[in-house]
Amino acid sequence: MSDRRGVLTEAFKSGNFLETVYACSRADRNEREDLALELAALHNEGLIDVIAGFKDLRNSSSSGPDFFLTRHIFEKALPHLNAPVSPVMSCVLQLFRDAGQDMMAGAIIEGFVGFCAKEPSRPREALKEIEADPEAFADMLTAALSAGSRIDNPKYLTEAIRLSESGNIEFRRRAVYAVGRLSWPDGAIVTDSAFEALERSTATETDDQILGGIVKSAFALLQRDRTQEVRAVSLIAIALDKGNDYALHAASEIFGFCTSELPASLCDVLLPQLIRVKPTNKGTL
């Protein structure tokens, strides 16, 4: 389109914004990155409201723009937007949940991490909003902690540890998982406090989702610091002994997707446990 900026601006005003975004993305698939940047620029100039526009996107079989292809443009634009954190979180959550069980459902979360990591105030504001309204925003906790750790690892590791001991089980589930998803500076070793937090959770928790999070986080820390093999493998072994379907699914993902990275000691832990997978959970296998 010769005047794509004008077309997009008019489409937003006239109420066919999403259809136009989808049409633009199909017109030239090689320029989808440019389209995302153009949308962000229009938003930042105050000519359109990308957040409001994409909040109307729905994953339905009825006629309309393709949900995932259109959402992908938003994912690419998101890190470049200047917008308040709360409405961005609401929009991202809606687009995440509307994706259902599709394998690409979580891709949009990485766009939100990039958005938060652009400004030091954004992860702080996200955590404040999440703790103020956990029912609405708890699903964004891991992303907020991960984004913050790109800016200040010690601060957001401390926050993850604090929330892993929260009275709110939804916070604990996500904070334990976040311990393994934090960014670390190049060359940094994993601090004892990260392992100690997982060890406390392993000793006290019985929730299967938390135990599955411990399995994944312990392995993620092992990938970063191979000198901690004994400690990480011990955490995984204890969590699997206490856990059930969620913990076993976490173990199966590690075994299936990271096979070449598994030390013999971890294989010795995983293989006997995976025998316990129920026949009804054959998708795990």
Image (cartoon, grey):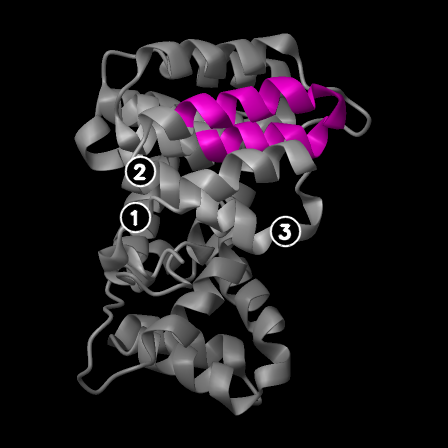
For residue 93, which numbered disc appears in the image? 1
Q: Which of marks 1 and 2 is in front?
A: 2
Expressed as whole percent of the image width and height from the top left, the position of residue 30 reads 64, 82
Q: Distance between the residues labelled 3 and 1?
A: 32 Å
Tell me whether the residue at label 1 lies in contact with that at label 2, contact meaning CB atoms closer than 8 angstroms: yes
The residue that disc 2 covers is 139
Dominant SS type (magenta):
helix
Residue shown at the point (65%, 20%) measured from the top left: 230
For residue 259, which numbered disc appears in the image? 3
Residue shown at the point (33%, 48%) measured from the top left: 277
Query: Which region is colored magenta?
Result: 215-239
Q: How crowded is mark 3: few (under 14 residues within 10 Å), some or many (20 or more)?
A: few
Q: Distance between the residues labelled 1 and 2?
A: 8 Å
Amino acid under disc 1: Leu
Residue 228 inside the magenta-drawn segment:
yes
Q: To which quarter of the image does residue 140 belong?
A: top left
Instruction: Tell me the quadrant of the picture where the C terminus can be found.
Output: bottom left
- In-front residue for pair 8/205: 205
Relative to 145, 55 lies left or right: left
Expressed as whole percent of the image width and height from the top left, the position of residue 153 reads 62, 21
Above or below, 265 relative to 15: above
